[in-house]
Structure formats: C-alpha cells, structure tokens
Image (cartoon, rainbow, N blue to C red):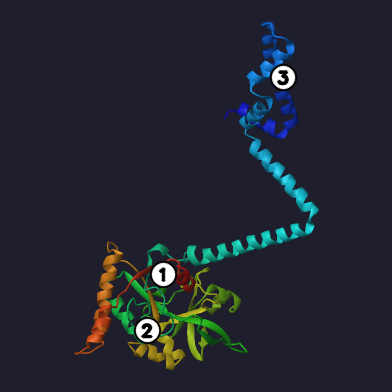
C-alpha cells in the first residue's frame, strides 16, 4: 500500500459524506457517458438511460463494491454496532449495570486465574539455571512415611545420604517435605517470642539451588553436623520486617524453641524457598540441628525408615536423565534390600523390585496445586 492509497482510505473513513458525494458524482458521469453513447446510436433518451443502467450493473451494487475496495466497511460496521449498543444501553440502565458488573467480574476472575496460573505453572524459582533442577519423585507424599513403594517421593535422612554419596548426580540436596512448621522465635531484647516458619535443609541446599545472600553466607555442608555450632539463614522479608533490616544481625543469636542459633546470613531478596505456599520460610536451619530444636524430632535423624524429606538435584554433564534415573533406582533398591537383612521375604523382595525413582522438573519449585491439576 502506497501513501496515496493510505490517504484515500483515511479520507474515506473520516470524511465519509464527502467521499460518498464524490463517488456519486463519478458514477453519474459514467451513466451520462453511456447514455450519450446510446443516444448517438439513435436510441431515445429514456431507453438510452435504461440501457446504460443495465450495462453498468446497478448503482447500489457498484457503490458497495467501491466502499469495500476502500476497506473501511468493517470499521464502519463496528462503529454502527457501537452506536446501536450505546443507544440500547442508555434506554435500559438496569440491564446495562448488570452487564457491566458481569463484565467486570469476568475480567477480574480471568486476571485472578492468570495470576494463579502464572504463580503455579509458569513462574520459575529465582535460582541458578532453574531448568536444570530435578525433583526426585512427584512430591505426592508430604509429612512422614514409614515405608516406600512404587514411585518414591519422600526419603529418610539415611536414604538421602546413601543416594547423595552414590555420586550419581552432580549434586543432591534435601529439605523438609511438610509445610509451615511454626516454631517459637525470640531475640535478645524482645519482650515476647513470636512464631515463624523454620525449614530444615541439607548443608548443600543453597549451593544446589544456586541461591546466595544479600549479606553473610549460606548454610554449608560443614554446618550440617550435629557437632557443628547451630546456624540459621533468615529470609530477606523476615530480616526487613522482624529484624528491621539491621546488618548487625549477622553473627547475633536468635532463639528457636529455646535453643540458641547464630544468624549467619540473609537470603537473597525474592527467594522464598522451594515450595509455593502462602507462608514461606522465615528461617532455614541445617537438618542435623533439628534435635536441638526438638528432642522428639531427633528420631527423624536416627530412624532410617522414617521418610520425610524431598530431594532435588542436578544431572552430571554428559549424563542423561534416563541413565541417572536407572542408577538412582538401582541404588534405592539396594538400600531397601539392605534394610531387610540376610533373609528377606518374597513379599518384601516383590515390593522392593517395584520401587523406583522418577524425575519431575524442579525449576518451578514444589506446588501441590500443580501436582493436583497437572
């Protein structure tokens, strides 16, 4: 389309009456020329005009074709429809109000659904290479389980260490599967303690995810030992809201269920953990330190068959997910077989043979809603 065509179409759109008048003049000119031609052939004036109109094909049809050629018919129809709709709505204001309210509710519902879809299905964790993260299992189990079967999604502390030390994946981290473990938090100078979500994680948790700190450092494998000094990393939000964004908190003491922990770092802004939940963790502590928080929880470290952890890791370069999954399944079955002693029953052998590990993309974090609606 050249500039001349564009100008003619814009002119037809915004100066319709003038353009229609020009079109009518042009059509009348052509009719007059045909009529004159017929008269020169000896036809009387009325018959000459009739023949001219017949040969021309009908003025109304030609006018519509010319308007369509200007490609403004669709816009004209839309404008006419809008004018008609406005007139109808102005006559029945009650119906108009209902329609507008329904439209507003529909737009709001769609916006809410998109926000949920974006959070649950589309958004990735703010970590290093989220697409490279793999969840072992599908996070169907949550809390505590005393047995494993079929596709395994929760693991004991002992089984986690067995799979980690099998050196199949480049890295493998563990973290508590249960959501929203509220514990009593208190700081020197506070009059009262306050509840906060505390999440036990393995010492390599932040390293595997690729999450840093805005100050201080993250938990490391050397912190994840019962003989190590108890340490904690606080979330950026908790640091700003409850600790006043004070940089002096690094190295200070915070009490978790009455047990002192040293704050060693503030997690990166925007990181709220591995799981989509309305009340994300405020503090992360090493798994090995849970006995200090609760003597009863110490049994989770001691009982090999108490499965309560999710595992997330990354593949080694050059190793496919199929290869890694087969090797992890073999390591899982060997561990389970060792738990049965020297003379396992046929039923136990059959159950062990049916256990396996599958991978789930971990870049979007863990969402039980994603699991339910996938």
Is 317 in front, or is 123?
123
Front label number (1 vs 2): 2
| Residue mark closest to the camera, 1 vs 3 | 3
Q: Where is residue 154 in the image (x, y as percent from the top left)?
A: 38, 79
324 to the left or right of 291: left
Q: Residue 288: x, y in percent?
A: 39, 85
Could you tell me how far apart the alpha carbons at marks 1 and 2 are, in whole angstroms?
22 Å
**Disc 3 from disc 2: Cα separation:** 91 Å
Q: Which of 16 and 5 is in front in this view?
A: 16
Tag of residue 138: none
Please report the residue visible at 45 percent of the width from the left and 71 percent of the height from the top: 371
Q: Is residue 116 visible?
A: yes
Of residues 35 and 254, the one drawn nearer to the viewer in this rendering: 35
- Residue to which mark 1 is pinned: 209
Q: Which of marks 1 and 2 is nearer the N terminus?
A: 1
Q: Badge 2 is on which residue? A: 307
Residue 277 location (% of width, % of height): 52, 74
The disc, 1 or 3, on the residue closer to the chain's N-terminal end is: 3
Relative to 219, residue 319 above or below = above
For mark 1, give the secondary structure. helix
Residue receiving disc 3: 28
* Residue 16 percent across, percent down from the top left: 72, 32
The reply, left or right, for residue 215 in relation to residue 240 is left
Q: Which of 226 and 17 is in front in this view?
A: 17
Residue 275 seen in the current view: no
- Residue depth check, mark 3 versus mark 2: number of the one nearer the observer: 3
């Amino acid at each position: 389309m050249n500039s001349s065509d564009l100008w003619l179409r814009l002119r037809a759109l915004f100066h319709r009456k003038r353009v229609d008048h020009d079109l009518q003049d042009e059509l009348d000119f052509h009719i007059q020329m045909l009529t004159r031609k017929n008269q020169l052939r000896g036809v009387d004036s009325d018959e000459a005009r009739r023949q001219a109109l017949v040969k021309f094909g009908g003025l109304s049809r030609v006018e519509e074709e010319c308007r369509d050629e200007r490609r403004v018919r669709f816009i004209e129809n839309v404008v006419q429809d809008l004018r008609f709709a406005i007139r109808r709505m102005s006559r029945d204001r009650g119906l108009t109000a209902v329609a507008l309210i329904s439209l507003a509710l529909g737009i709001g519902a769609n916006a809410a659904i998109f926000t949920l879809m974006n959070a649950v299905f589309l958004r990735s964790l703010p970590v290093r290479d989220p697409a490279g993260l793999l969840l072992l299992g599908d996070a169907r189990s949550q809390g505590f389980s005393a047995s494993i079967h079929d596709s395994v999604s929760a693991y004991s502390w002992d089984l986690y260490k067995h799979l980690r030390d099998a050196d199949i994946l480049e890295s493998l981290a563990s973290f508590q599967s249960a959501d929203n473990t509220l514990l009593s938090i208190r700081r020197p100078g506070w009059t009262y303690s306050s509840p906060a979500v505390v999440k036990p994680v393995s010492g390599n948790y932040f390293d595997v995810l690729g999450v840093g700190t805005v100050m201080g450092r993250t938990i490391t494998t050397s912190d994840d030992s019962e003989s190590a000094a108890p340490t904690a990393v606080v979330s950026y939000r908790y640091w700003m809201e409850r600790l006043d964004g004070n940089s002096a908190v690094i190295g200070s003491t915070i009490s978790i269920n009455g047990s002192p922990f040293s704050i060693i770092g503030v997690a990166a802004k925007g990181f709220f953990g591995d799981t989509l939940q309305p009340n994300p963790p405020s503090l992360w502590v090493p798994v090995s330190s849970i006995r200090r928080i609760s003597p009863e929880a110490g049994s989770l470290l001691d009982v090999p068959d108490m499965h309560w952890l999710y595992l997330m890791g990354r593949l080694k370069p050059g190793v496919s997910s199929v290869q890694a999954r087969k090797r992890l399944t073999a390591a899982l079955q060997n561990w389970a077989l060792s738990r049965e002693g020297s003379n396992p029953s046929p039923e136990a052998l059959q159950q062990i043979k049916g256990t396996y590990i599958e991978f789930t993309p971990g870049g979007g974090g863990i969402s039980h809603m994603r699991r339910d609606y996938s």
